[in-house]
Amino acid sequence: MRMMRRTVFPAALVLMAAACASPAREPQAPTASGTAPAARAAAEVDPAQIVPGAIVVDFKDGTTKAQFDAWEKEWGVDLEFNSIEGADDGVTLAVGVDDVDAALEKIRQNPAVESAEPLLEIHASYTPNDPQYAQQWNLRMIDMPRAWERSRGKGVVVAVIDTGIAYEDYDDFKQVPDLKGVKFVKGYDFVNDDEHANDDHGHGTHVAGTIAQATDNGQGVAGVAFEATLMPVKVLNHFGSGTTADIADAIRFAADHGARVINLSLGGGGYAQVMASAVEYARKKGVTVVAAAGNGGRGKVEYPAAYPGAIAVSAVGPDGTLAPYSSFGRELDIAAPGGDKRQGDAGGIIQNTIDPRDPSRSVYASYQGTSMATPHVAAVAAMLYAAGAKSPDEVEQALYAGAKPVGNVAWSEQYGHGVLNAEASLKHFRGESETAWSPLYWALGLMALVLLSLRGRERPGFLNILVRPAFFAPLLLATVGVFFARSWFGGASGLGSDAVDLASLPIPDWQRIIFGRGRTVNPLFYSALIPLGLSLPAIAWKGMRPAVGGLALGFAGFLAYAAWTGAPSLAWMPFTFIARPWLVFHTVMCLVIGRAMLKREEA
């Protein structure tokens, strides 16, 4: 009896894409295999839905297991009924198929086959019952229906540093109805110096609504991370203006009182060291700071978004292109829906807020601006923290990897790494967290390749290499770093945060600390330069060779993994497509260096 492999993908988690089949009334080729519907389905399917190496075959009713067992050898697959319904409906499943396209081509020729196609994984799409949700094009643009199935930001504190939030009934202030049920922690009013950070303008409440408006409550509209917790922090008065001193104090306050994400939908003016220091302070405390690029419609990102350590956000309209008012520039990180009301209110971002003429009156207002784009990013950052992200670096990596590129470039001054996509970022984070050791696995695999390429009497031996700290420690440092350093030592007294950050990163990523966090990575670190430089003195001092060999193979694993998963944007390169060839070339160079260092000299 054959071992059934179909249990790898339980039938409860995957569905056949029957909806992709062509209606019977449409003209199609007169073949038993239904080639025309199959071609149409292939054109409509999102590649991300395809389960690798799995196919579903629907036989005509009455086809027996004995019959399709006899055909399997020719097809090169192992089919089993998908469920107890299989004997009646003829739906079968095969997994572990090496060449799906070739197998399907053969299977579709059999007259007993009604359809044969790749197996698709279908995700539930969460649709809230908020009556005005249909008007929120911005949530569909960033793929929130599917993202909500992965995370909703539960328990993550997001500080909204703005005009305040209509979060409580206090004196003449009233909580807006669509924030009822949302969780809040104590904030502060830096304008009036009290603990009641109520909104007398409307801007801050609108921003807070995008982050965590009460959702699926049968009222109004939805929010992005609606299970997150909001911290109201007022720094702007009823005219919408404030001071750099108040904003700097507010950033530090939020970082010191449990915020994991800070939203700064404000900006303008020149560089202020007090604010730059506050952003740096928050980031070193593990807080993700998200800020609006500005509404000047010019090629200059405004402060605080332009400060190192802040995620700078530009705005796009419903068509996904840069809004005419949005600022942009070399400091930009990512774009998000901010609205474009040239065609009316439907093009704006709608949320529940207050009437600025009467703070006790609630309205649903359509706004536009990079101020509206920023909370989308802040909310997805909260969702990533709720999904298990530990640091701003992890959050940023997932945000940028999941962003949808515009114009087929890895980064641009208008869109940064692309337009925000919550589902893709959460999916990327899950994949990265499940394969956190992948660069090390690459390095070990390449090490085996290097050692096997040596003649027998030149090989130092696998175990002899692996058990030597002089070899293995540099290999580990170059691939994954001392990844536990931030969680183990980050809060220890006497240990500088820069030193902890440096130790926790793979050596190629030390460029983040040395050169500062930038929008592109330093190609000198993402290369064979460091192993090559250290290999020169190792020619004379043989004792260095195991360490340099481990370092070189560690760099090879890191660079190979970076090239495989998606090459980063490299500084100083005239074209973005050069990044992957650069990484591949330097991977090979590191392998050559590693081979030379590990080669045992003949006696």
Image (cartoon, rainbow, N blue to C red):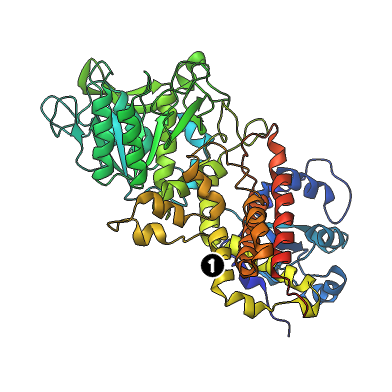
Q: Is residue 137 visible?
A: no
**Going by the image, does 559 lie left or right of 299?**
right
Q: Quadrant of residue 14?
A: bottom right
The spot of residue 312 in percent (x, y) is 46, 31
Q: Quadrant of residue 469?
A: bottom right
Which residue: 40% across, 55% down? 500
The vertical placement of 450 against 555, above or below, is below
The vertical placement of 565 against 275, above or below, is below
Which residue: 78% across, 41% down? 25
**Going by the image, does 102 lie left or right of 252?**
right
The spot of residue 496 in percent (x, y) is 34, 52
Task: Judge by depth and name the residue closer to the eye, 187 or 88.
Answer: 187
**Going by the image, does 181 lie left or right of 33?**
left
Which residue: 50% across, 29% down? 331
Task: Judge by depth and name the residue closer to the eye, 385 or 207.
Answer: 385
The spot of residue 466 in percent (x, y) is 60, 75
The spot of residue 330 in percent (x, y) is 54, 27
Figure quadrant of the N terminus: bottom right
Q: Residues within 10 Å of mark 1 (few under 14, many from 20)?
A: some
Figure quadrant of the C terminus: bottom right
Q: Quadrant of residue 504?
A: bottom left
Which residue lies most toward the front here?
540
> Mark 1: which amino acid?
Ala
SS class, disc 1: helix
Task: Judge by depth and name the residue closer to the eye, 53 or 391.
Answer: 391
Which residue corresponds to mark 1?
Answer: 473
